[in-house]
Amino acid sequence: MSAARQRLLDVLAPVAAASGHDLEDVAVSSAGRRSVVRVVVDKDGGVSLDDVADVSRAVSEALDALDAAEPGVLGGSYVLEVSSPGVDRPLTEPRHWRRSAGRLVRAVLRDGGTVTGRVVEAAADADGGVVFDVDGTQRSLAYADLARGTVQVEFSRSGEAS
């Protein structure tokens, strides 16, 4: 991880937390003479457009202050993009798994295997794990055994009327 990216994470994580959000990612790329700063935030219950607007204002103020104090971090002018994680975001943290309760997830295990099932429950702390419903049978896996997960897109859940 670059020093500039780490500096942005350090500055923006408390800004996101102050508004009740988790900072999921920060990426900076060049676009001509400008930098594009992409900030991804999430929270329990999801991120609304009003949330994105509120976080954008707070992050913009923090980035302006950082740019004034440390001009080399952003490299001059920048464009800010704030969004929520997409459905294809990998589930790697306990909060990701917890927020996916009720969703169908394909989990890749550290031993190379996979499990596909509905997340029944997920522990809040890293010492816990996830309980899956795999074809009607519950299967518990510790976070230590999970490499990552991916939410599966469902156009209609099984058992729902078409």
Image: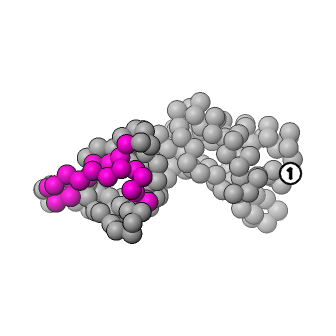
Q: Is residue 21 left or right of residue 27?
A: left
Residue 150 in view here: no
Q: Is residue 5 left or right of residue 134?
A: right
Q: Nearer the viewer, residue 94 or 26?
A: 94
Which residue is located at x 83 percent, y 54 percent?
75
Q: Name the residue under label 1.
A: 72
The kind of residue tagged 1 is Gly
Residue 6 in view here: yes
Q: In this view, does 41 lie to the left or right of 62?
A: left
Q: Is residue 153 above or below residue 100?
A: below
Which residue is located at x 76 percent, y 53 percent?
3
Return the residue found at the far top. 18
x and y percent of residue 81 in the render?
A: 63, 52
First to last magenta residue range: 128-148
Q: Is residue 113 above or below residue 118?
A: below
Is residue 136 located in the magenta-colored stretch of the structure?
A: yes
Is residue 145 located in the magenta-colored stretch of the structure?
A: yes
Which residue is located at x 85 percent, y 40 percent?
68
Q: How crowded is mark 1: few (under 14 residues within 10 Å), some or many (20 or more)?
A: few
Q: Nearer the viewer, residue 102 or 76?
A: 102
